[in-house]
Amino acid sequence: MPDSLPTNEIYLENAKKAERHLERFKGSVLGHFINGKHTPGTSGKVLDNISPIDGRVINQIAAGTAEDIDAAAQAARNAFPEWRDMPATERRRILHKIADLIVSRADEISLLECLDTGQALRFMSKAAIRGAENYRFFADKASEAANGLSMPAAQHMNYSVRSPIGPVGVITPWNTPFMLSTWKIAPALAAGCTVVHKPAEWSPLTAMLLAEITAEAGVPDGVINLVNGLGEDAGKALTEHPDIKAASFVGESATGSAIMKQGADTLKRVHFELGGKNPVIVFEDADLERALDAVVFMIYSLNGERCTSSSRLLVQESIHEEFIKRVAERVRNIQVGHPLDPTTEVGPLIHQRHFDKVKSYFSLATEDGAEITVGGHALDSDGYFIEPTLFTQADNKMRIAQEEIFGPVLTAMTFKDESEALAIANDIGYGLTGYVWTRDAGRGLRMAHGLEAGMIWVNSENNRHLPAPFGGMKASGIGRDGGDYSFDFYMETKNICIAFDTHTVPALGKRP
Ligand code: NAD
């Protein structure tokens, strides 16, 4: 902790509750969940799950192997026909039940997520509820999943139908792991797929709660399976397994590339949600107060460990000095602290390795000629706390402007006019999101259409609407999540063509 443990009453109450929920994990090895049962796995090897808050071991997890993945994939394959053939109305009922159970355990999920990831409760308290909303949304869409198109031609009737692709692998990262898992698993289940989930090894706790809740809600054994372990072992085996028909992955771009290679032999269908280095562009005519709120929120919330964070700030030259001064003031005031303290805005980073990576950009920034206007240090603590940091005087060639730092660290640059803003914003390998602040509607539209990114917000921070497509261009991803887009990934489309018996069938070998 930065100083010492907080003493306010809400923190103390949260800490007491969190401790109670943590009891079942402490001192034990968290295994896998395969075919409706908890299992210790085959390797006997374990991994430490480290607390971001104080570096201590929270618990251990089983290091899943190819054998464990095989058992989970077989369970998912065996469960598939029953789940696929279950009436959609029944799947809908079960998915709503999952949502109910998530809501009834929302406190437990949020508190454990804070301890496991270091994310502040002010953001995580909504994580479980948002997860439940994902289930409700896809529950209500389950009966539309098989829908296709009607495409009449002159002499044939064409129509398409969709059917679930089969057992799928879901691989998730450690930032907001519960919410992200629901985002992937809910549409898969609604579509009629069965699932093998490999959660991130640095934040395994709430994934097990989700698997248990799903089973308790009444899915048949084998519909949901969870294998803990390392990406390069359990994750790799999952993406190589012949019974797993598709891999839905959220994580780093380099890992996405590895998964594509691993899945090549089995022609795996892949869906990738990868990294980002997203621009937020502030024009001189913007509502600067709202822009300021959004700029600060979108990089310093969730510890900056957020794929959609606006980590590159582009400010028009004419307002640059004043706007950066105001950003700096806000950043200096950001409260770093224990995730369960209600006053905390930024908690500790997830893990020593990530902490070292984020810190390495402090010296890189100055070596490359940028200035550290705020922050730039780690806090004296056993946990992985760093000061919210603002780099200024940067140009777009620097590593701090090109690489995903994935921490509470903002790189600020200037631009002269619209075309320069667009050129800087697009001069990057990533393309997940872009944010534009202007009162000129035409300029907002021109920028939105010109930016090379999968999601653009004009005069808004990231605001998720579940039917809308979510995903990235360039190195930020392949495919889209949300609404019907999710079903497109988890389902096969079949076209059926029936003749009106009016056309001439070509006849060979026929003698008059
Ligand atoms: P990561 O790629 O290191 O790990 C993600 C998951 O992949 C983990 O479960 C890991 O065990 C597994 N994995 C690692 N190597 C693997 C392999 N060879 N085969 C199969 N699985 C493997 O990512 P991370 O550090 O956990 O997460 C942070 C990254 O996730 C950031 O780049 C962030 O931008 C990205 N992210 C993207 C989105 C999005 O929607 N685009 C959302 C959240 C996070």
Image (cartoon, rainbow, N blue to C red):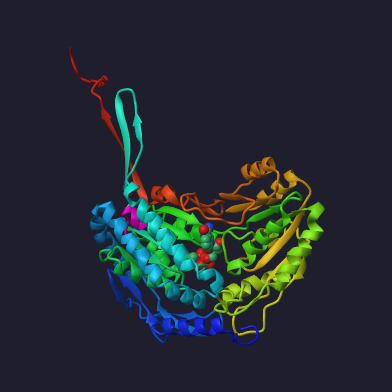
Expressed as whole percent of the image width and height from the top left, the position of residue 60 reads: 43, 81
The location of residue 228, given as percent across then percent down, is 40, 72
Quadrant holding the N terminus: bottom right
Residue in front for this viewpoint, 318 or 79: 318
- Residue at the extreme front: 9
Which of the pair 460/57 is nearer the observer? 460
Pick whichever, 332 or 66, lies toward us: 332
Q: Quarter holding the C terminus?
A: top left
The answer to whether residue 445 is seen in the rendering is yes
Q: Residue furthest top?
A: 512
Check if residue 434 falls in the magenta segment.
Answer: no
Residue bounds of the magenta highlight:
188-194
| Residue nearest the viewer, comparing 136 with 87 | 136
The reply to whether residue 392 is in sight is: no
Return the x and y of residue 84 as percentages of the image width and height.
27, 54
Instruction: Tell me, yes or no, whether the highlighted magenta stretch contains residue 190.
Output: yes
Residue 511 vs 362, above or below: the answer is above
Q: Could you say which quadrant of the image residue 195 lies in?
A: bottom left
From the viewer's perspective, is residue 251 above or below residue 485?
below
Q: Quadrant of residue 244?
A: bottom left
Q: Vertically, is 109 above or below 430?
A: below
